Image: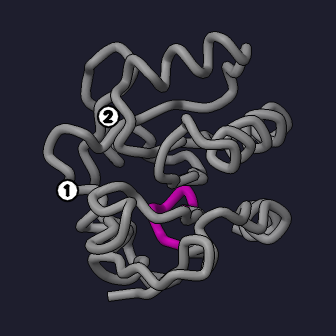
Amino acid sequence: MATVTLHGDSIQTSGSLPKTNSKAPDFSLTNTDLGTNTLADYKGQKLVLNIFPSVDTGTCAASVRQFNQEASELDNTKVLCISRDLPFALARFCAAEGLDNVVSLSDFKDRSFGKNYGVAFTSGPLETLLSRSVVVIDEKGQVVYTEQVQETVDEPNYKAALEALMDA
């Protein structure tokens, strides 16, 4: 279990992020067409998992915009924006913002992603949503970088995530 804060108040998550140099846990997430995407769908590609509570908050929306901008310049890389928002909300947000360099995925169905990656909130006002985190996975499926943002309303360290991606 990890402890982060929301406006300074402590809240817990279901576990800890995967360790660097470990095999990335598999996932089954719902895409905006209501189909299923798994880790195997991205075999041989570098991945940035941009994990957040809800695209309907300012910080979450900013992270999707920032990673969308950065992703347009990355080779063999996919940015997966993951939350428990309904796929309809994720599609609507990306369409309204003109964001087409990220893949929006939802953990709303079986909620196994939040458990397997240790990011599901287990207490506080965001209970059951996902903790703001970034996980970078190389082409071989190995975790090369993780960050769980300590204060939920803060943005992740984009530069560190992208540098880890370039070094992968």
Residue 145 shows up from this direction: no
Spot occupied by residue 119 in the image (x, y as percentages of width and height) = 38, 68
Q: Amino acid at mark 2?
A: Asn
Above or below for 106 versus 9:
above
Q: Which image quadrant is residue 62 in?
A: top right
Percent x, y of residue 132 = 54, 62
* Number of the label disc, if any, that sits on residue 112: 1
Residue 47 is at least partly visible in this image: yes
The magenta-colored residue range is: 137-143
Q: Secondary structure at mark 1?
A: helix
Q: Amino acid at mark 1?
A: Ser
Q: Give the SS element for disc 2.
A: strand
Q: Residue at x 77, y 68 (%)?
A: 157
Look at 29% across and 31% down and name the residue there.
Answer: 30
Q: Is residue 91 above or below residue 76?
A: above
Q: Who's the residue at 58% across and 63% down the image?
A: 134
Give the number of the disc on residue 37.
2
User: Could you say where residue 161 lies in the image, as x and y percent from the top left?
Assistant: 73, 65
